[in-house]
Amino acid sequence: MPQDPTTFRRFLLAAGLTNLGDGIATLAWTWLASTLTRDPVLIALMPVALRLPWFLFAIPAGLVTDRVQRKRLLLAMDVIRGLAFGLAATCIWQALPLADPPAAGASDPMLFSALALTALVIGIAEVFRDTAAQTVLPSIVDHARLEVANARFSTVELIGNTLLGPALGAFLIGLALPLPFAVNAAAYLLAAVILLRLTIPRRGALPLRRPWRHELAEGFRFLAAEPTLRLLAVFTGGFNLLHQMIVVGLVLHAQENLQLSAEAFGLVLSAGAFGGILAGFIAGPLVARFAGARVAQVSSLTCGFAFGLLLFVGGGIGLSACLMLFSFCGLLWDTVSVSFRQRAVPDALLGRVNSLYRLCSWGMMPVGLALSGLSVDLAERLVPRETALLAPFAIASLGVFLLTALGWRGIGRGFSRLPG
């Protein structure tokens, strides 16, 4: 599959370390925020700080990715994230012990503000790093096997982000609040060391520098002229908004309605990853058997059911089953859509087109996180809090069904012309 097996394996290993850090942070950031405040809007601000940079910096990240040596960009962003997590660990350690969280406001406003700013820096570095990483993959993998390679990367992402990371994060939180952030710092810096020893080829020479407006317009024209890419960008943006709506509600629902500890909630998130891991092994054969169009359509439809089932499950096992179903279908969707984009876009434009695409798709994540907290806050004025915590799940389920209905035919037509 890979053009250089050693490069591919090491690149995959570095991705595994960074995704393990992301998985630890998935639980650590939101759980730590909940120890400083019980206000759902304030709690949502922490993950918003991590995702807002996708809206603010996606376009600059694409321009930079197409202009510089991508290996250097990857290295710099991993080092920045490692240092930022180290700073967060230090801030938390100096603030211990923490006071009980109030219903409104934060028990330690200075610490909350410092952590939110640190999360923003980490989020900015993630935008540049992930844009460069997805742009590099077609340079080290044969195009005919991109589905398999992307599925492997998605599997590694799930293992780190959802299987091992949250469980490890919960365990580390149980030992000491600063510990997850210190471990993350070590993971990112070790990933940088691995990347330092890699030779990452580039398909073609670095383009001549031109005014950034001209370069951006070139990427925009390419994306605007490709109807399937346009549809995928808009569809994925709406889907990501709805997915992020369940994030804050899921934490509070697990804590208050289901009475799950940090350790138990971490295990729930980890169990949910098994669906995606299974999909990672069979994504390639499924696409070959049923074609990308059908896989994408059915995956989207099933995600709507997975979100809706969250309204009815009453324990950790049921919650795990819903997350397993979602992660299975979500990985299939990502594998097909990312592979389409990597084939359809020339290497010289891939960074800019990726950035514009992600501005539409990932840029909607902070909107979904903010709407999650707001939906709970508004629903709580009409119904008891335990019921209000379910509002994001209902909105997300209905929204995914609507998106699927609107995009069904366009996806079918577009993927039937998937470039080879």
Image (tube, grey):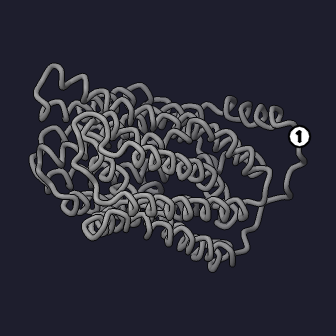
Secondary structure state at the residue bearing disc 1: loop
Q: Residue at x 22, y 57 (%)?
A: 265
184 and 391: which one is in front? 184
Q: Dot 1: within a 10 Å radius of its alpha carbon, few (fewer than 14), some, or many (20 or more) residues? A: few
Residue 140, image x, y percentages: 67, 67
- Report whether 305 appears left or right of 120: left
**Residue 82 found in image quarter:** bottom right
65 and 142: which one is in front? 65
Residue 14, image x, y percentages: 55, 71
Tell me the residue that label 1 is attached to. Answer: 210
Say if residue 287 shows up in the picture.
Answer: yes
Q: Residue at x 50, y 72 (%)?
A: 186
**Residue 57 found in image quarter:** top right
Say if residue 285 shows up in the picture.
Answer: no
Residue 56, image x, y percentages: 60, 36
- Report whether 106 appears left or right of 103: right
**Residue 60 found in image quarter:** top right
274 and 418: which one is in front? 274
Q: Residue at x 74, y 30 (%)?
A: 221
Residue type at mark 1 is: Arg
**Rendered view: 125 above or below 237:** below
**Rendered view: 417 above or below 273:** above
